[in-house]
Image: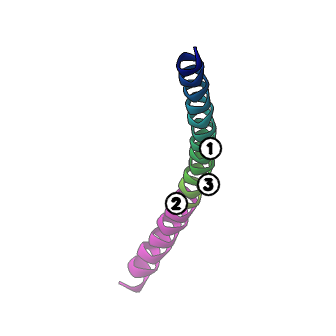
């Protein structure tokens, strides 16, 4: 009777450890998703700035010619 109870206790402990790791992974994935969203916003803003600068440069080059 001791061995089956020990096996059940160890199985429960193993599931508890896996659940803790699953929560940690979930939290890190959410944090990574937030960083990706923030970086995407910054890239979009930089792309818009670059597009405006290119338009101004093209306009200046046209005026020179």
Query: Dot 2: within a 10 Å radius of its alpha carbon, few (fewer than 14), some, or many (20 or more) residues?
Result: few
Of residues 11 and 49, the one nearer the viewer is 11
Does residue 49 belong to the magenta stretch? yes
Asked which quadrant contains residue 64, the reply is: bottom left
- Secondary structure beneath dot 3 equals helix
- Secondary structure beneath dot 2 equals helix
The percent coordinates of residue 12 (x first, y second) are 60, 25
Q: Are marks 3 and 1 in contact (CB under 8 Å)?
A: no
- The circle drawn on residue 24 is 1
Observer-side mark, 2 or 1, equals 1
Query: Dot 3: within a 10 Å radius of its alpha carbon, few (fewer than 14), some, or many (20 or more) residues?
Result: few
The residue stretch that appears in magenta: 43-65
**Along the polypeptide, which appears first: circle 2 or circle 1?**
1
Q: Are marks 2 and 3 in contact (CB under 8 Å)?
A: no
Q: Quadrant of the C terminus?
A: bottom left
Q: Residue, x 57% and y 43% (percent of image)? A: 25
The percent coordinates of residue 8 (x first, y second) are 57, 20
Direction top: furthest residue = 1
Residue 59 lies, with reference to residue 41, above or below; the image says below
Residue that mark 3 sits on: 38
Q: CA distance from mark 2 to mark 3?
A: 9 Å
Residue that mark 2 sits on: 43
> Is residue 59 toward the left or the right of residue 1 in the image?
left
The percent coordinates of residue 45 (x first, y second) are 58, 60
Of residues 37 and 51, the one nearer the viewer is 37
Of residues 40 and 22, the one nearer the viewer is 22
Direction bottom: furthest residue = 64
Observer-side mark, 2 or 3, equals 3
**Along the polypeptide, which appears first: circle 2 or circle 3?**
3
Query: Dot 1: within a 10 Å radius of its alpha carbon, few (fewer than 14), some, or many (20 or more) residues?
Result: few
């Amino acid at each position: 009777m001791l061995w089956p109870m020990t096996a059940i206790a160890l199985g429960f402990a193993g599931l508890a450890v896996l659940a803790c790791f699953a929560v940690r992974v979930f939290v890190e994935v959410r944090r990574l998703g937030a960083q990706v969203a923030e970086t995407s916003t910054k890239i979009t803003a930089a792309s818009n700035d670059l597009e405006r600068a290119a338009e101004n440069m093209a306009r200046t080059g046209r005026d020179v010619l």
